Each structure stands twice: as structure tokens, then as C-alpha cells.
Image (spheres, grey):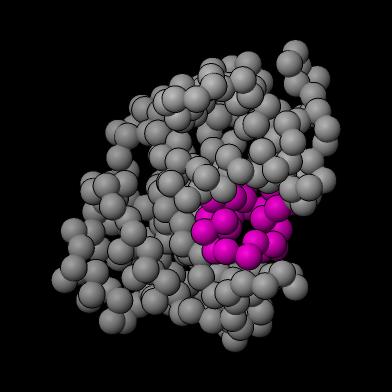
Amino acid sequence: MKKNQTYATDLTNRQWNCIKDLIPAAKPGGRPRSLDMRQVMNGILYVVVSGIQWRLLPKEYPNWKTVYHYFRTWRDNGTWQRIHDTLRAQVRQKAGRHKHPTAGCLDSQSVKTTQIPGERGYDAGKKVMGRKRHILVDTMGLLIIVVVTAASMSDPAGARVLFSRLGGAGKKLRRIWVDGTYRGKLVDWVIAQRRFVLQPVLRTDGKKGFLVLPKRWVVERTFAWLTQCRRLSKDYEVLPATSEAMIYLAMTRVMLRRLAA
């Protein structure tokens, strides 16, 4: 165990140095912040990686209500996505890439939900009752944006929602590789509405079962990275926005490990 670490999920000194300046400052007025924000981050990451309930957070971290308060506040004001996007740009620049990707890969993943109330639906194709994660990644497998919907939403409909939220992160995108599900009216709609194009990558061998396909394997690897966090093995959240925040946090952890290497 490295110095200043209580659990394996805690940030190392190098990782903390990469993110500490991105943590929002305390609100002006009132008492100065006395809480150790590194421990707050460690507590949040412990929940994401280990998959426990918030109230089961170990006593070494700040009170679980306090830790959850910061998670929820930063979820609602977009802080988690801003931190994630800043780190993605740094990882790309470290790899010698431009901070804004020009190509990406789009896909979805249907996951089961629990008995916790919240939006859900049935994916007849995957035979899954739960939610669907629509993600767009760059050619390094780094997340650009995620949208979580009921599993009953079709992939093309989910893609339209995702593109509507894309914002500045996709301003240099010119090509996105997709599977055959996204063919049809969506391709024409993207050509008319966006600056990029969708390029389907299809199987040609007629074989059944899993097969590694050019370009598309990148997004499949990203899904594998996400499910290394037990909180993401299913969708345990009441709100889809919470699920999205958890995914941004999981990818933030991946990128911090790269930046600190």
C-alpha cells in the first residue's frame, strides 16, 4: 500500500496532484473549508469501485452523508463531466494527440437494474430488463459522452439524444464508426444536421458469435473498463443522471492512472 493510502482505491499522491486543482473551491462567505477534499474523492471512488451502498462507507472516510452530498452536488452542476473532459484532453495531449478528437466510435450496452425505483425498460434484442448506456469514445477508447436511458429505447433514438448533448466536446469530430443498428434514417439525419458522418462497420463472414471488428473493438474495450467497477456491473441508481456520473467517475479513475504513470 502506498503512502497516504488507506484502501487500494484511494488516489496516490501523483493522481491527487493531477486532479486537486480541478476540485471546485468552497463557496465564498462563511467558515473556511476544513474538510479534506482528497478524502472526499477517495470515499466517492471507493463507492464506485467496490459497489457498496453510500451508508456503508468505511469510517476512515468523512461521514457518508457529506461524501454523498458532494457527489450529488457535483453531479447536478456538471462538475464530474467538466473534470472528466479536462483530464481527457490532458491524456490525449500526453499521447501526442490533439485535445479534441476527430474520430470516434459509438455503441450501446444494456444492463440489468435492481428493485430500486427508477426509469427502466425491456431490450427485446438483448432480452434485458433495465437501462441502456449509449457511449461515444475517441480512437483511444476515452469517453467523449455518455447518455443513460431505459433499455427499451432503440440505439438510433439513443444516438440522437447523445448527439443533442454533445456540445463542444465533439466540435472537431468528422467520422464516427458504428454497427449496423445505426444504419438507415439516422445516417441521413446526421449528414443533414451534423458536421460528421456515421460509417457502419459490418460483419462479412456470416459467422455467429463474438468477432473482433476493425474500429468497433475500441468501444467494446471501454465497456470492459467500466465493468471493472462493481457499481457499474448493474445499474443500481434511481436516476439515470447518477448512472452517467458514475461512468464519468470510472473513466476519470482510468485517466488519472495514465497521467500519474
Q: Tally the marks.
A: 0
**Left/right of residue 14 with respect to residue 7 in the rendered view:** left
Front residue (pair 198, 81): 81
Please identify the residue farthest to the bottom as the structure is shown.
Answer: 124
**Left/right of residue 163 with respect to residue 234 in the rendered view:** left
Task: Please tell me whether residue 261 belongs to the stretch shown in magenta.
Answer: no
Front residue (pair 70, 6): 70
Residue at 31% x, 81% y is 184
Q: Is residue 216 visible?
A: no
Q: Is residue 244 visible?
A: yes
Q: Position of residue 136 (x, y in %)?
A: 42, 56
Predominant SS along the magenta part: helix
**Looking at the picture, does residue 24 appear above or below residue 228?**
above
Magenta stretch in the rendered image: 222-247
**Looking at the picture, does residue 252 appear above or below residue 131?**
above
Tell me the quarter of the picture where residue 62 sits: top right
